[in-house]
Image (tube, helix red, strand yellow):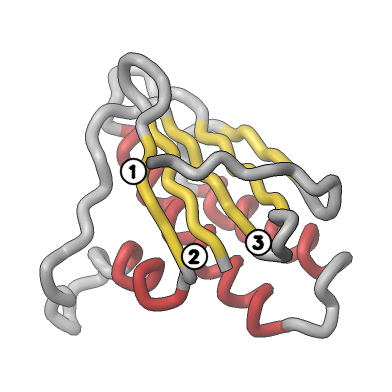
Amino acid sequence: MCLVPTRSGTADFTLRFPAHPVWVRNARHAMRTALSTTVVADDELIDTAVLLTSEVVSNAIKASLDCPSPPPVDVHACWSPDGDLQVNVYDRAPGDPRLPEQAPPTEDENGRGLLLVTRCARRWEVCRHVPGSGKTVWFQL
């Protein structure tokens, strides 16, 4: 079952950008800026949200770059009525991100993103809610 967030109107933002690696940095910056205006006293939450957003956006961009004409990626963040931060990253690329069965060797530079999401997020899921390609990876903190 896919969780559909209820918008609270507090710190909600949506960002759509081209599938290009330079936009990972922009997504991190947007997340930090949006959260810093509402949860100033919670640096740990902000840092975790920025890290996990970076990892999920990186996966979405990588999947999108495999498409013949790379489609855009969307990031949406909102607060649930219960006070949880929910971040949704939507890409239009086929395939699902896969959680590795074990951590990659220490010398590998990739492959830890979903392991970080699993370890740091309260909940996360991959949702396919439209016909055709595309999915949303969401997490809650």
Task: Determine which of the numbered discs, if any, sits on residue 62 in the image.
Answer: 1
Residue 39 sits in quarter: bottom right
State how many labels appear: 3
- Residue in the image at 38% along x and 38% along y: 127
Q: Residue 1, how many percent across, how many down? A: 38, 41
- Distance between the alpha carbons at the discs numbered 3 and 2: 12 Å
Q: Residue 56, how many percent across, how many down? A: 43, 54
For label 2, count other residues whose C-alpha is less than 10 Å away and answer few (under 14), some (14-19) or many (20+): many
- Mark 3 lies on residue: 85
* Residue type (three-letter) at the residue carrying disc 1: Lys
Task: Determine which of the numbered discs, if any, sits on residue 48 in the image.
Answer: none
**Pair 3/2: label in front:** 3
Does the rendering let one see residue 85? yes
Q: Secondary structure at mark 1?
A: helix
- Residue in the image at 77% along x and 64% along y: 35
- Mark 2 lies on residue: 52
